[in-house]
Structures are given as C-alpha cells and as structure tokens.
Image (cartoon, rainbow, N blue to C red):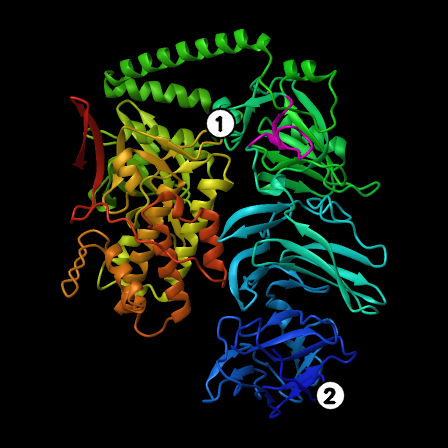
C-alpha cells in the first residue's frame, strides 16, 4: 500500500526530511523511493520500486528487519553523511552507517535511474550506495560478490513472504573463495539446494532453458583481483528493463519489463526440474530428464549402492569400475553437453589451452577431470578437478565438454561408445563380476595380512618399533603418491638434544598423552617445540603415525606446522614450529590473563579456528576429522593467531564417506558429541560440536566441564547458555573481564552460532562452510534447538569409551586418562 506525494526531486538534502507519503523520483522517472506496506501488512518500510510500472514491484528495502508500525516515520540526512529512518518518537530504527570523510559540503542522497540510492558530497564522491546492500533483487550494474579488504559480501536474500520483506530462508550467493572458479548457489538456511554453473563466457552455463530476449543485450562480467571478486552485468535496451530475484520459495527468476506495454514477462525460473537439485545423483552420477530413470553413472563408473538405486535413491553416487593407479596409459574420456561439476574442489588457470590443460591433469595423479569452461571462439582457460565430481547434468543445449580420467581398460571398453553425455543406468556387465571378486578377495587377504603384521608389531620392544617406523618413513620420504607426498626434515638426536639443552627441565613446556614437550632453539636460531615419546605412553605410537603420515601433508595458516621428526634407538620425537603464546586455555581460563584477550582478538580466534576446520573438512587434499578439538589444542603464535594442534587422535574420511564408526571412542569430556560418545559415530559434525563448545567458552571465559551456576542450578555451560538464550538474556553469558568494550551484535551472533553447533542431532548442526559464512555474514540465522547435555562433571582429561557386549547387552565404559 502506497501513500505518495512526489517532491519532483531525485535527492534528499541536509535538513530536508522525507515524510511518510512523500517520495523522490529518479531523473528519468524510472524508479521511486518512499514508504510502503507490502501485501496485506500494515507495517511501513522505506523502499525503492519501479515508477509507473504496475504491479508495484519493489527492488530494495532499507529497514527489512525493523519495520515502522505507523505512518509517523521519516527519513533524514545529517551533516556526517548518515541517512536515517526515525520513528514518531525520534528514535533511529535504521541508518546507512556511512560517514563522510573530508569535506561535508553539499551532502545529498540521490536516487539514480539505475535504481541505486547514492549518498555523495559536493565533489560527486560517493560515500555509500544501496547497491552494496542488495535485498532479493539483482539489477544491472549491481555487484554480487565479496570485497576482500572490508570483508563485505553482496548476495541476494529472499523475502520471508509477500507480506514480510525481512530475510527469508533462501539466498542466491556466489562462491566467494580466492583461487576458485566462480559459480552461484541457491541455499536454504545455508544448505545448498541448487547450483548455477559458472559462466561459460557468454551466459550462465547452469541455466540451459534461459533464452535471452532478442530485443535486449545483457552481458555478464566476472571480475577477480586481489581486492575483490564479483559478478556484474550490463544491459542495453531502449524500451526494456530487466531484473533477477530470489523468491521466498527459493527460485531464481529473471523478468523483463516492456515500458511500452507496461507488462512484465518471465524469461527464467530456476530450478525448473528435479535434475536442477544439487547433487541428486551423488558423486560421479549424472542426471538427465530425458532418460527413463533420471540418474545414472558416468561411463567407467557403477552404482555404489544397488539397493538404494532400485529405490530411486542415488545419494550414495557411483564408484569407478577400475581404480586408478597413475599408470602411464591412463587417459581421458570426453563427455559432451554437460553441466560441469561443482568447482569447489577445482583450480583454474585462465591462460592454458585445452592441450596444456590435459597435459597438466595427466601428470598429476590426483587430477580426476579437466575442461575449458569458456566456450567463446578461440578462448583459453583450464579447470582441473581434484576429488569426486558432483552435480553433473546432461543438457539439450548450452552444455559443455568434460574430460574424465579413466583407467586404460575402461578407455578401451568405452572407445567405441558414444561420448555425448553417455551414462550407465543399469548394472555393470557380468563379465566384470569375476574380476571384481578376485580383486575383493585379494584385498581381503591383504587386510588380514596387514592386521597380522600390526598385531606382531605391538609386541615388539620400543627400539624395534622405532627402527620399523624409521624404515617406513625413509621409504615414504619425498615419494609422491596419489594423496600427496611427505616432505619433512629428519633431525639427528644430537641436534634435538643440543637445541633443548639435553631436555632440561627449564625447557619443558608441558606434558601430553604422547609425552613431554620441550622448547628448543636450533643452531640457526629457529625456535622449535619437541614432543618426546614417553616410555609409559599408550597412545604415542599411533599418534606418531597419525602426525607424520597424515598431518604432514596438511598446510594451513590455522594449523600448527610439523617441521620434522627424529627416531634413534628408543627415542621417537616430533618437531613443530614453536608457539610463543602457548595455548588458548592458558589465557581464557585464567582470571589474571583472560583480560589480555579483548573481544576483537577473541572474535579473530573464533574465525581462525573455523577456517582451520574448513581446511581439514573440505579444502585439503585429505578429509580429516580432528576428534579432540578443545581450548588446550588451540595454540597461539606471536601475533595471537590460532593454530589447531595435536592430531594424534585425528582420522581421515575415505572417499565420499560423511561419517565413520569406531568401537574405541577417544577425546575429551565436555567436547565429545553425543552420537560419537554413545554410538562411536564420528564425522565433521563431531568437530562442529566441539567447535560450538569452544565458541561458548571463548565468549564466556568459562570451562564447559566443572561449570556450575548455583543461582539457576545450571551444571554445564551448554545448558546455561541455552537457558539464557531462551530467556532473551544471552548478553549475560559474556565474560565480565571484557568490560563494556564489545559490539553487542557480534557477540550475540557468536553465541547464536555456538548454540547452532552444539545441537543434539548431528544433522541439525551447520556445515563447516556454513559456520564460516555465518561468521563473516550479516544475514539472519536459523533458530537453534536444544543442545546436547551428554556428559556432565568435572573431569577434563582425554577419555576412551569401550563397548563391551555381555549376554547381548551392550554397556559403555568410560575411561578417563
């Protein structure tokens, strides 16, 4: 509902208030700004809409989350360049948060014919614009992406419904990661629902049914540099206007307006069919709406789970019929007319030719596929995929070529078949059954032999074990394999002894499950930390193998770096970079030191830990679950940057597995997720639970274990945080040592994210990507459900939970170490 009285101007100047009922109109009467009520709502919002283009189409709303409840509101511009909406009581309910630096002369807020509201000074220098804060509508000239300097992201968020413009469940958001080829996702509460494939040099490749109107020209540009990354599109027509929106039901729609007929026409609605859903056919699966069953496997692959396949459930995806071994006769099979796979696990080089792209993929055993995403004539560009291929679809038009790595035997089998998007939907040929059986039997015998050797090794004396490890490491040292290579320094015992002053008590930093930790200084002056295997350690040998064989391949600014190792006789040692500021628990749980961590520093630590987890869970060449994330395992470097450490209990997830199970549960009381503690199930969501506990500890300055709040009879931190949240008093959780110098919004958002991470059900917890996005973004958050209260008490050491079966009744026994 509108109450308009145009001021016949396109600007708001100093001391010229815009009242409810007044509007300003852009120079060519294209857009209008004023107060309105959406649908049947009586709330009032400041918005921008198309002028003289029925029905009333709003493209931007200022106060989406803070509506006025009457018509007494007004808009005013102050002498600092801040545009505000104030209610009848004179209280500001929304502001632009802009500030003019330098001259404040002739400040104005101007509505442009692009639909952009700009605040600028007399020198025509823009200090704020509405295009930097999009709602549900994407207009020509508007950026969608990320500014890496400010951290600000620009993406679309749906309305909640036609009567409520507050942020809804859906977002239309590009992949905003440096070094990645950009694509756009539709997410529901941070979970990917659909993916619009990357631009192909002409248009969006993931919208095959989109047919641009011949009456206009729309060009998309992808800009990537050190400072920012964004999409923008230009539009050229004398009588048409165009807009893209994300609807409250999660669809991207493209509409154009004919200004001569004043009619809107829809050019696109996406997703349009089941194949547009994200990854519906699983890894290496391919979706086609023209096939009898929409899902099948790429040629050279077969279904992982035939039982699920028969029930039309392809979530498990497909697997290779012949595994890769990096043999020289491996090659690539071309599939045409495809939607290219998700590029999150791909790298891009814009200068490579297709031939150079193939050669680059061929020499890297981890490369699974390659393509040139740019279909314009004579174009260069190379996408290399590492890992599983997911979200592939056959198109009737606008498709692209994908070259998939296959074993030599599969290339010969498929050489006579059609390569145009071919896929296998039935069972693999019977001829292969015997071969697979032989391989499976051989693999089984190999596992039995390996277990026998390991059982023998357990009974060897320490010196023999050390020699065995040394031989294994010497064999693996600097040898490339499909999963990467180990490049570590082998330190002499004399070097370590000299660096640590013969392991003197003055150099001892602490004690862990592996053994004592010492500070050392190498001859060239480099400071190191040395973990020395204790003779009484039960977990030391396993931890050593984990750290050297697995974690040595992981490199990230938020992971502690393993420099090398030393094995000599009975001595087994790991050498790390030295962290001068010790661990997070040394600060956060000490009353005399916690005040040294102000809020900006705590928030930076929360961010850093999340980025380290994202690398472990998704971005590294291995998918690693830490299993013992806690404040004591977060080390701080000289600039107080957090580093995740102690990977002795970490485990890798194989292939496309999302979880694994163990009979021996290890970790630390208070940080263990309920599904892991009770059923031995661990996944990335187990680490997310531990991370949520950490966030609440960092905000409150309290340990999760041993926590007691006598006034409310709360006997663990999660329960206390949950009660305060439900009572609307989350602010009371904040560490008193922070004083009053913290931003309320940022702190409350951190608590909210922490509670989302510690929810009882693993599937309710956000993904690691979602956590990082929520920390960096400003959008609305889903409501958390009740957190898990699995273990209560004062013990905080590592635990092991063993399952014992007695007369078919399973008991869980918890051992504290």
SS for tag 1? Answer: helix
Which residue corresponds to the image point at 20% horizontal and 51% vertical from the top-left? 705
For residue 492, say whether it is visible: no
Inspect the magenta stretch and tell me whether residue 675 lies in it. no
Neighbour tally class for label 1: few under 14, some 14-19, many 20 plus, Cα within 10 Å: some
Residue drawn at (22%, 34%) of the image: 800
Q: Residues within 10 Å of mark 2 (few under 14, many from 20)?
A: few
Q: Quadrant of the C terminus?
A: top left
Q: Which residues are magenta?
A: 283-299
Q: Please say whether residue 289 is visible from this viewpoint.
A: yes
**Please, is residue 422 above or below residue 626 in the view?**
above
Counting the numbered discs, the total is 2
Nearer to us in this view, 435 or 104: 435
Answer with left or right where residue 620 lies relative to residue 530: right
Residue on which disc 1 sits? 308
- In the picture as drawn, the residue positioned furthest to the bottom comes out as 15
Is 485 placed left or right of 638 in the picture? Answer: right
**Which quadrant is home to the N terminus?**
bottom right
- Rendered view: 709 above or below 276: below
Image spot of residue 605 (x, y percent): 39, 56
Q: Which residue is mark 2?
A: 8
Q: CA distance from mark 1 to mark 2?
A: 65 Å
Q: Is residue 54 left or right of residue 599?
A: right
| Residue 219 x %, y % | 78, 56
- Chain-order first, disc 1 or disc 2: 2
Q: Is residue 389 above or below residue 704?
A: above
Contact, CB < 8 Å: mark 1 with mark 2? no
Q: Is residue 394 left or right of residue 236?
A: left
As drawn, the label of residue 396 is none
């Amino acid at each position: 509902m509108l109450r308009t009285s145009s001021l016949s101007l396109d600007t708001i100047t100093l001391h010229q208030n815009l009242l409810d009922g007044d509007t300003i109109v852009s120079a060519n009467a294209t857009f209008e700004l004023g107060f309105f009520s959406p649908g049947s709502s009586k709330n009032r919002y400041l918005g921008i809409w198309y002028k003289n283009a029925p029905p009333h189409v709003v493209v931007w709303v200022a106060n989406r989350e803070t509506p006025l409840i009457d018509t007494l509101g007004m808009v005013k511009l102050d002498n600092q360049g801040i545009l505000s909406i104030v209610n009848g009581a004179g209280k500001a309910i929304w502001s632009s948060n802009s500030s003019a630096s330098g001259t404040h002369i002739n400040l104005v807020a101007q509505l442009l014919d692009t639909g952009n509201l700009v605040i600028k000074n007399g020198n025509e220098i823009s200090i704020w614009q509405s295009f930097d804060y999009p709602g549900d509508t994407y207009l020509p000239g508007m950026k969608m992406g990320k500014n890496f300097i400010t951290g600000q992201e620009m993406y679309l968020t749906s309305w909640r419904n036609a009567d409520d413009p507050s942020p809804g469940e859906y977002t239309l958001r590009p992949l905003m990661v440096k070094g990645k080829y950009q694509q756009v996702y539709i997410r529901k509460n941070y979970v990917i629902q659909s993916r619009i494939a990357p631009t192909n040099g002409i248009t969006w490749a993931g919208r095959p049914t989109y047919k641009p109107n011949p009456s206009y020209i729309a060009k998309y540009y992808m800009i990537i540099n050190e400072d920012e990354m964004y999409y923008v599109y230009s539009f050229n027509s004398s009588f048409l206007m165009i807009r893209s929106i994300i609807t409250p039901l999660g669809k991207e729609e493209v509409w154009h307006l004919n200004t001569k007929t004043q009619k809107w026409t829809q050019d696109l609605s996406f997703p349009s069919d089941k194949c547009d859903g994200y990854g519906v056919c699983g890894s290496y699966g391919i979706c086609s709406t023209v096939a009898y069953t929409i899902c099948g496997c790429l040629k050279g692959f077969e279904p992982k789970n035939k039982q699920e396949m028969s029930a039309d459930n392809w979530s498990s995806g497909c697997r290779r019929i012949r595994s890769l071994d990096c043999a020289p006769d491996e090659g690539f099979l071309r599939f045409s007319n495809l939607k290219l796979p998700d590029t999150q696990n791909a790298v891009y080089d814009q200068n490579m030719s297709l031939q150079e792209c193939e050669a680059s993929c061929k020499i890297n055993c981890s490369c699974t596929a390659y393509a040139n995403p740019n279909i314009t004539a004579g174009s260069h560009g190379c996408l290399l995929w590492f890992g599983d291929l997911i979200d592939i679809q056959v198109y009737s038009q606008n498709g692209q070529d994908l070259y998939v790595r296959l074993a030599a035997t599969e290339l010969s089998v498929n050489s006579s078949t059609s390569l145009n998007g071919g896929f296998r939907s039935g069972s693999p040929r019977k001829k292969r059954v015997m071969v697979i059986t032989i391989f499976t039997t051989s693999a089984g015998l190999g596992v039995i032999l390996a277990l026998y050797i390991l059982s023998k090794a357990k009974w060897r004396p320490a010196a023999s074990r050390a020699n065995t490890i040394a031989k294994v490491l010497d064999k693996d040292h600097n040898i490339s394999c499909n999963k990467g290579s180990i490049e570590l320094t082998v330190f002499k015992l004399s070097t370590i002894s000299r660096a640590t002053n013969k392991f003197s008590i003055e150099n001892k930093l602490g004690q862990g499950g592996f053994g004592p930790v010492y500070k050392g200084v190498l001859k060239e002056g480099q400071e190191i930390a040395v973990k020395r295997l204790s003779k009484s350690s039960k977990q030391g040998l396993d931890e050593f193998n984990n750290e050297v064989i697995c974690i040595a391949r992981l490199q990230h600014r938020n992971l502690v770096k393993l420099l090398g190792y030393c094995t000599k006789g009975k001595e087994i040692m790991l050498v790390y970079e030295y962290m001068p500021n010790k661990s997070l628990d040394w600060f956060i749980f000490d009353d005399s030191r916690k005040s040294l961590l102000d809020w900006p520093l705590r928030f930076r630590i929360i961010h850093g830990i999340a980025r380290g987890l994202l690398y472990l869970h998704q971005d590294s060449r291995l998918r690693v679950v830490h299993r013992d994330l806690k404040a004591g395992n977060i080390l701080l470097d000289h600039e107080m940057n957090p580093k995740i450490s102690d990977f002795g209990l970490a485990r890798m997830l194989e292939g496309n597995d999302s979880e694994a199970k163990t009979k021996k549960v290890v970790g630390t009381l208070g940080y263990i997720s309920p599904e892991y503690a009770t059923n031995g199930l661990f996944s990335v969501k187990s680490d997310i639970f531990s991370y949520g506990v950490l966030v609440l500890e960092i905000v409150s300055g309290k340990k999760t274990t041993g926590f007691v709040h006598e006034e409310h009879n709360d006997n663990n931190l999660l329960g206390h945080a949950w009660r305060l949240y439900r009572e609307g008093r989350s602010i009371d959780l904040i560490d008193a040592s922070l004083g009053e110098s913290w931003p309320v919004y940022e702190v409350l958002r951190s608590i909210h994210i922490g509670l989302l991470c510690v929810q009882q059900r693993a599937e309710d917890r956000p993904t690691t990507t979602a956590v990082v996005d929520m920390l960096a973004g400003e959008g609305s958050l889903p409501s958390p459900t009740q957190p898990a209260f699995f273990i209560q008490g004062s013990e905080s050491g590592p635990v092991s939970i063993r399952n014992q079966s007695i007369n078919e009744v399973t008991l869980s026994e918890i051992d504290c170490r």
